[in-house]
Image (cartoon, grey):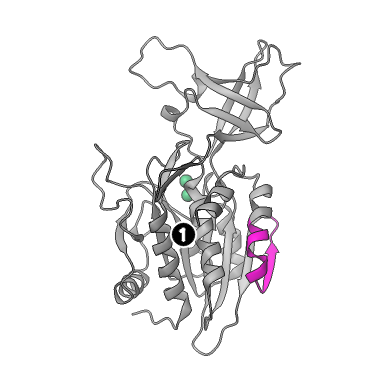
Amino acid sequence: MKELIQKLCEISGPSGYENNIREAIKKEVTPYADSIEVDPLGNLMVRKGKKTEGGLRILISAHMDEIGVIVTHVEKTGFVRFGNLGAAFPWYLPASRVLFLNGTRGVINSEPREDNTKVSTIDQSYIDVGASSPEDCPVKIGDVGVFERPFMDMGTRVASKAMDNRSSCAVLIETLRQLKKSPHELVFLFSVQEEVGIRGAVTASYAIDPDLGIAVDVTSVGDTPSAKQMEVGLGKGAAIKIRDSGMLCDPRVVRWMRETAEKASIPHQMEILRQGSTDAYVIQTSRSGVPTGAISIPCRYVHSPSEVVDVKDLESSVQLLLKLIGGPVQLK
Ligand code: CO
Ligand code: ZN
């Protein structure tokens, strides 16, 4: 599992530029898929199984894009001004390194800094790519990049710039790999453009037209020294979402997930996230509405270049998904 997470995390795939990560995931899932399709937006849809009696069409979604930067302007002096692709928080930017899709690397700094107690804005920041003029600058307006930081193995905990959401992509791949049989028609969706406003899952869920939806994504935690009060913590299992700022999960789906986890003694915890949402938000309101829930991977330092997850939580999430989709579903 660790190797798979590392492999997926190290690929650059900012929102709207998911080609490389899509190809890598395609390679991983091909041996286990009945069919694979890429839609006009770039969503990867992996189908497995047919509906048998009492079976449903179940959509299981994880976004594959990551936050990044986009060049807005190159100064006369060769410094690169940039905007964000997704919520790149300004307090994580100084001294971060950027890898552009064309291979260019750079360092972020910000000026002016009269007051060291204040965080600089993105507008006060720039990327130094080693250029001294627009002519010798290896990037131009519209070029995109991601944060660069090597994958780090801390035992059961691992750190990377793209745990959001490659850790969930790994969970979906591993679930597909371990799945023996299911009465359902399963569609594993690796969606695009979640970080810029949950866009890929909109068109994909319309096309898939599911009877039931499950999104897998990371969630924040409340177990760091001065964190805001929150139940979720690292290493305590798959987090079953009750609500976030985008949606109220279908209570029947929440109950089904909770009871399934309890019955199978799968480590789990209940999640309420005050800020942020997932693909589940748009799956739920697709077409005439879809009963939808979400499984979250607890993650520290979300949207930083060093997001930390616990591999045990990913394993619990795989076990829970296998139980959920491996048998008949009765929502009550
Ligand atoms: Co995110
Ligand atoms: Zn995410």
The segment highlighted magenta reads: 25-40
Residue 289 visible somewhere in the drawing: no
Q: Which residue is mark 1?
A: 216
Q: Residue at x 58, y 70 (%)?
A: 187
Q: In this orientation, which residue lies closer to the viewer: 291 or 74?
A: 74
Question: Is disc 1 surrounded by few (<14), some (14 to 19) or many (20+) residues within 10 Å?
Answer: many
State the image quarter where residue 185 is shown: bottom right
| Image location (x, y in percent) of residue 308 | 41, 44
| Image location (x, y in percent) of residue 219 | 38, 50
| Image location (x, y in percent) of residue 17 | 66, 44
Query: Which residue is farthest front?
Result: 155
Check if residue 265 falls in the magenta segment: no
Q: Residue at x 34, y 60 (%)?
A: 237
Circle 1 SS class: strand
Query: Which residue is farthest bottom?
Result: 53
Relative to 14, does residue 21 appear above or below in the rendering? Answer: below
Task: Give amino acid for label 1.
Answer: Val
Q: In this orientation, which residue lies closer to the viewer: 174 or 269?
A: 174
Judged left or right of residue 76, residue 111 is left
Assess mark 1: CB under 8 A from ligand 2? no
Judged left or right of residue 277, residue 125 is right
Q: Residue at x 30, y 51 (%)?
A: 233
**Number of numbered tags placed on the structure image:** 1
Q: Residue at x 36, y 14 (%)?
A: 116
Picture quarter with the C terminus: bottom left
| Image location (x, y in percent) of residue 9 | 55, 46
Residue 33 visible somewhere in the drawing: yes
Check if residue 33 falls in the magenta segment: yes
Relative to 54, does residue 174 appear above or below in the rendering? Answer: above
